[in-house]
Image (cartoon, rainbow, N blue to C red):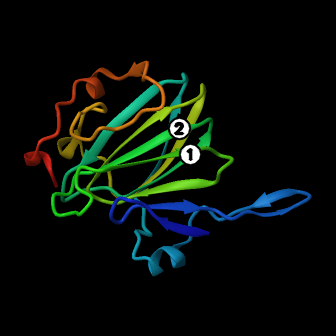
Amino acid sequence: MKIIPTSIRDAFIIESEPISDDRGFFASLSNSNEFKKQNLETEYDRMAVSQNNKKGTLRGLHYQLPPKQEVKLIRCIKGKIYDVIVDIRKSSPSYKKYFAVELTPENLKSLYAPKGVAHAFLTLSDNTQVLYQISSDYQPDLYRGVRFNDPAFGIFWPIAPTIIHPRDASYPDFTDKDAV
């Protein structure tokens, strides 16, 4: 397993290295010992799956406020997604910057999203499933979002989103007072 830094502080690509033979392959998707060496979260309160029926479905940008900020380990288990995180930590050198990666079951990559980033994904194929490991329980009173096309971030989206939940489409632009 490779743990590869991204342009966002404390965010990583987790790249599984399959061991193949005539049966197929075996690959570790996460490893607490390797995560601990990098000071990454190793305990997750919940695991969730998101089913997305149509290409062009956008979910996000979501985040949760302290004291229940979330670390997320995100993996596409069916289909293809364009996965995006935006650093909303005012003290971070990557504040207001974004990082994006394509995740598929075939490329065996996961995105490790640290506390203090907003997360979104856009489906690039029909019938897509995304698996999350999340470090904190969902707290509706602490749950927030930022609009996916906020000019403050300048996120490039490879295709135009066609399905967006009304809540996600109506999030306000990000301001410094929203920083965590």
Q: Amino acid at mark 2?
A: Ile
Q: What is the x, y in percent for residue 142?
A: 19, 46
Nearer to us in this view, 54 or 5:
5
Q: Identify the residue at image location x=60%, y=61%.
A: 29
Q: Residue furthest right?
A: 22
- Separation of disc 2 and disc 1 at Cα? 5 Å
Q: Residue at x 48, y 31 (%)?
A: 158
* Residue labelled with disc 2: 81
Q: Which residue is mark 1?
A: 103
Q: Which of the pair 25/175 is nearer the observer?
A: 175
Residue found 26% across the figure and 41% down from its top: 153
In terms of sequence position, does the residue under pointer 2 or pointer 1 come before the other? 2
Q: Are marks 2 and 1 in contact (CB under 8 Å)?
A: yes
How many callouts does the rendering have? 2
Badge 1 marks a residue whose secondary structure is strand
Q: Amino acid at mark 1?
A: Leu
Residue most extreme to the left: 177
